[in-house]
Image (spheres, rainbow, N blue to C red):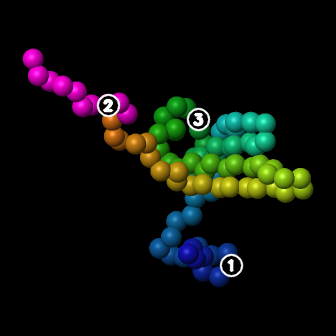
């Protein structure tokens, strides 16, 4: 998909969002995951609106860097997470 008109201009019907800050990061033994919201987080109300980029940087092998950037990772399952079938006879 192309969102620009040429190299620098944004198309008229597109809106581009950029991360405003690095909000938090999780470090593991072989990777770091950073969370960058599209709005500055001034108070907790800012965490409910706007998007979030999830950036994961890892090194799967020597002299190799892997970078994964995800904008929308889906939503939580809305199905029951427990067994809802049971015998209701008395």
Secondary structure beneath disc 2? Answer: loop
Badge number at residue 75: none
The quarter of the picture where the C terminus appears is top left
Badge number at residue 42: 3
Looking at marks 3 and 1 on the same chain, the residue that comes earlier in the sequence is marked by: 1
Residue sitting at the far left: 90
Are there few (<14), some (14-19), or many (20+) residues within 10 Å of tag 1?
few
Foreground pick, 85 / 7 = 85
Image quadrant assignment for residue 67: bottom right
Check disc 1 and report the residue beneath it.
7
The quarter of the picture where the N terminus appears is bottom right
Give how far apart the Cα atoms at labels 3 and 2 are. Answer: 41 Å
Task: Tell me residue 19's x, y (percent).
Answer: 64, 52
Q: Give the residue drawn at x 52%, y 53%.
A: 72
Foreground pick, 5 / 60 = 60
Task: Tell me residue 79's x, y (percent).
Answer: 34, 40
Magenta residues, dominant SS class? loop
Secondary structure beneath disc 3? Answer: loop
* Residue 24 seen in the current view: yes
Image quadrant assignment for residue 24: top right
Above or below — where is 38 with respect to 8?
A: above
Residue sitting at the far top: 90
Secondary structure beneath disc 1? Answer: loop
Foreground pick, 71 / 3 = 71
Check disc 2 and report the residue beneath it.
83
């Amino acid at each position: 998909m192309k969102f620009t008109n040429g190299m620098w201009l944004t198309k008229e019907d597109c809106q581009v969002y950029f991360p405003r800050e690095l909000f938090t990061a999780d470090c593991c033994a072989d990777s770091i995951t950073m969370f960058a919201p599209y709005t500055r987080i001034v108070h907790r109300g800012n965490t409910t609106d706007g998007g979030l980029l999830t950036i994961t940087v890892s090194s799967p092998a020597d002299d190799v860097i892997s970078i994964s950037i995800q904008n929308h990772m889906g939503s939580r399952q809305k199905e029951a997470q427990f067994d809802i079938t049971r015998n209701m006879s008395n």
